[in-house]
Image (cartoon, coloured by chain):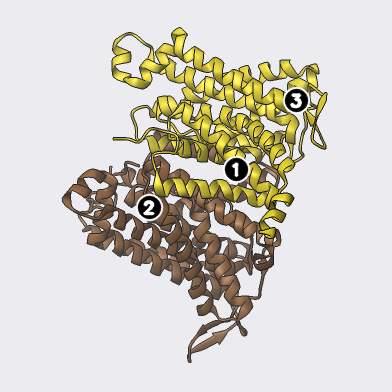
Chain colours: A yellow, B brown
């Protein structure tokens, strides 16, 4: 009994609470990336391997715009717009010729794109870590820590972007086109919806969301050319655990996995905490391969 | 991947020779060139050719999955790396280092990894399979990278090369020439085995899984079991490539377990031509040659993967059968 009492007494409750906040913040960024990935998969049947690279390039573009103008918010918007244009160009040049071919071709092509983008970033910016300063520097006290407000703002902003996007899908004209295309491509085309352009638009929106999360994340850890792969892997795990092509599921899974990883860092080294998300993935594959956060398929 | 089976008997030009004769003549010519090559080539290119053969073996192993079973693996670095570390372990722990023991241990390591990956990821199809193999290979990377006490962490393991021994017959240090011949023997044997496997009834079932999985299941084949065996087989050959690489370079490093190795493997396959077994070796040769050429022309810092990525994408869009498939069609015209 005393052992248990001692354990409860020693239990790092404050640390766990701090990690809860941390987990939700990274979870929201991850949700923003993963929802772009899910969107592109759900509508175009394309697994966008280059998504992490768009995230990384978005952060770099944000860094360049910030260095030129000094405004973080301008960097956020400008980077999202530029990467959206890049995404549209990529879709038109490489993915459009593959419409109607085996979807496995698209994962190969986007893998090629990710190689090109990653090496371009390495060539252009070198292997040094670039940092964008936080736009909001005030802090509040969380137990013994001075916790930056900026992280809370990131979480709120990500939630706002995802919420706005959801409203757009629900009520916007283009959003309705997107949903119609997702439901039945042939029928949508018959009703006069320009399906190829819907695809381009979807890819551009997904790219913009990745870029925005890249800029939002940049002040937390800095920008380097390898960050894309780490995040796209996490986003893949989230998308599989949340149920492929399911927007709500991936958001829930993103927060769930980030929380678990954050708690794991209380007890083990951060580089080993990644294994937690791998374990979640394996368990999901074993017991519920359709995804944790979707209704049971009949 | 939709690949037309290229190794079906094809009429070869207007010569009227049977396919088998043409195949074995070509095989003999290529073999002769490869056997003589190290005697003619300077030291650097000798090593280069040996490495191309090793990468070719890795690519060929993954072709069994991509080209024949229709599953794209982005996780071959795990098998390759485990083969490497298995061999390293055997060479470091046993004194004097024994080549055959190293091969055995490397294969055991790769088989363990392959069993793990196969058991879980064959539950999923197509894209999901590709993603999960990638994630699983990252698991192995994280473990190897962080378990410094056993694997040497970031520095990897360094060891001395074992002697080339054939019990009671031959025992000598490896030279670059004998190393080349040894690798060539292993790769050729693997090629012949894989060729036999893909033409056996087992290989036919794999191809029918690629063409139409639900129908194969409906006919009554236990598709999951076939998939697991094909992943394991592929993993074993990838592990063999890892052992060869470890013996050739006398080190095992976590970099080779990292995703980039798997990515390169996929590139070799696509460039060379999937579903051909020889294609991936051609692809590996092309890739390494381009890389070397670009490094010589534009300096070491040149991002050679940018032009190679462009070639890769162009080939997927315009030449889905790869260089070898293209060459065959051109020859047959």
Distance of label 3 from label 2 (alpha carbons)? 47 Å
Q: Secondary structure at mark 1?
A: helix
Q: Disc 1 is attached to a residue of which chain?
A: A
Q: Which label was assigned to residue B65?
A: 2
> Which residue is depicted at the point 47% across and 43% down?
B131
The local crowd at label 1, few if under 14, some if 14 to 19, many if 20 or more residues have their Cα within 10 Å, is: some
Give the residue pinned by disc 3.
A150
Q: Disc 2 is attached to a residue of which chain?
A: B
Asked if both marks, 1 and 2, belong to the same chain, the answer given is: no
Q: Position of residue B271 (x, y in %)?
A: 45, 45
> A249 or B218: nearer the eye?
A249
The local crowd at label 2, few if under 14, some if 14 to 19, many if 20 or more residues have their Cα within 10 Å, is: many
Name of the residue lying farthest toward the left? B219
Q: Disc 3 is attached to a residue of which chain?
A: A
Asked if the residues shown at circle 1 and circle 3 are in contact, with their CB atoms under 8 angstroms apart, the answer is no
> B74 or B144: nearer the eye?
B144
Give the residue pinned by disc 1.
A260
| Left or right of residue B272, residue A144 in this image | right
Asked if the residues shown at circle 1 and circle 2 are in contact, with their CB atoms under 8 angstroms apart, the answer is no
> B39 or A65: nearer the eye?
A65
Q: Position of residue B300 (x, y in %)?
A: 70, 47
The quadrant of the rendering that contains the C terminus of chain A is top left
Distance of label 1 from label 2 (alpha carbons)? 34 Å
Position of residue A72 relative to residue B306, above or below, is: above
Foreground tag (1 vs 3): 1
Name of the residue lying farthest toward the front? A1
| Left or right of residue B311, residue B226 in this image | left
In the rendered image, which quarter is residue B47 located in? bottom right
Q: Secondary structure at mark 2?
A: helix
Q: Secondary structure at mark 3?
A: helix
The quadrant of the rendering that contains the N terminus of chain A is bottom right
Mark nearer the N terminus (1 vs 3): 3
């Amino acid at each position: 009994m005393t052992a248990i009492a001692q354990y409860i007494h020693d239990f790092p409750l404050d640390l766990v609470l701090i990690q809860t906040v941390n987990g939700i913040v990274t979870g929201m960024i991850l949700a923003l990336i993963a929802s772009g990935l899910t969107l592109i998969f759900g509508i175009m049947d394309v697994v966008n391997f280059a998504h992490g690279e768009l995230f990384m390039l978005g952060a770099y573009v944000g860094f360049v715009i910030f260095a030129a103008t000094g405004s973080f918010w301008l960097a956020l918007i400008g980077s999202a717009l530029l990467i959206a244009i890049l995404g549209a160009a990529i879709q038109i040049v490489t993915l459009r010729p593959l419409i109607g071919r085996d979807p496995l071709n698209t994962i190969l092509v986007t893998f090629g794109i990710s190689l090109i983008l990653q090496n371009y970033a390495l060539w252009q910016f070198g292997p040094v870590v670039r940092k964008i300063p936080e736009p909001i520097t005030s802090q509040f006290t969380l137990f013994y820590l001075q916790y930056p407000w900026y992280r809370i703002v990131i979480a709120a902003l990500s939630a706002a972007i995802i919420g706005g996007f959801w409203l757009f899908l629900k009520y916007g004209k283009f959003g309705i086109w997107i949903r119609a295309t997702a439901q039945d491509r042939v029928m949508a085309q018959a009703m006069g919806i320009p399906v190829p352009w819907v695809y381009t638009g979807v890819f551009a929106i997904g790219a913009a969301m990745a870029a925005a999360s890249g800029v939002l994340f940049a002040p937390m850890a800095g920008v380097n050319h390898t960050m894309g792969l780490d995040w796209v892997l996490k986003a893949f795990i989230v998308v599989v655990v949340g149920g492929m092509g399911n927007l709500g599921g991936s958001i829930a899974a993103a927060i769930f996995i980030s929380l678990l990883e954050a708690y794991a860092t209380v007890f083990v080294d951060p580089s080993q905490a990644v294994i937690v998300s791998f374990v979640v993935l394996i368990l999901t594959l074993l017991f519920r391969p359709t995804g944790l956060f979707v209704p049971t398929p009949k | 991947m939709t690949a037309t089976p290229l190794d079906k008997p094809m009429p070869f030009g207007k010569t009227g020779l049977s396919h088998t004769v043409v195949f074995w003549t070509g095989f003999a010519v290529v073999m002769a060139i490869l056997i003589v090559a190290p005697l003619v080539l300077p030291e650097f290119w000798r090593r280069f050719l040996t490495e191309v053969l090793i990468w070719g073996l890795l690519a060929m192993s993954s072709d069994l999955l991509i080209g024949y079973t229709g599953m794209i693996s982005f996780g071959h670095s795990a098998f390759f790396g485990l083969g490497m570390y298995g061999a390293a372990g055997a060479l470091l722990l046993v004194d004097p280092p024994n080549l055959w023991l190293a091969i055995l241990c490397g294969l055991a390591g790769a088989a363990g990894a392959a069993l793990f990956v196969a058991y879980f990821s064959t539950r999923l199809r197509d894209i999901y399979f590709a993603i999960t193999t990638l994630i699983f290979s990252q698991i192995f990377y994280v473990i190897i990278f962080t378990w410094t006490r056993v694997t040497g962490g970031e520095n990897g393991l360094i060891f001395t090369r074992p002697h080339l021994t054939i019990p009671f017959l031959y025992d000598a240090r490896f030279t670059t020439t004998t190393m080349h011949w040894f690798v060539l023997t292993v790769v050729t044997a693997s090629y012949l085995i894989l060729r036999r496997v893909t033409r056996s009834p087992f290989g036919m079932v794999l191809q029918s899984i690629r063409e139409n999985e639900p129908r194969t299941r409906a006919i009554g084949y236990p598709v999951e079991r076939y998939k697991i065996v094909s992943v394991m087989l592929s993993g074993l050959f990838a592990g063999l490539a890892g052992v060869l690489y470890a013996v050739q370079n006398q080190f095992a490093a976590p970099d080779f377990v990292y995703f980039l190795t798997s990515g390169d493997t996929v590139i070799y396959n696509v460039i060379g031509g999937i579903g051909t077994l020889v294609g991936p070796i051609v692809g590996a040769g092309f890739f390494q040659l381009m890389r070397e050429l670009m490094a010589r022309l534009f300096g070491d810092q040149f991002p050679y993967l940018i032009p190679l990525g462009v070639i890769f994408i162009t080939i997927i869009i315009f030449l889905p059968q790869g260089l070898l498939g293209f060459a065959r069609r051109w020859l047959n015209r």
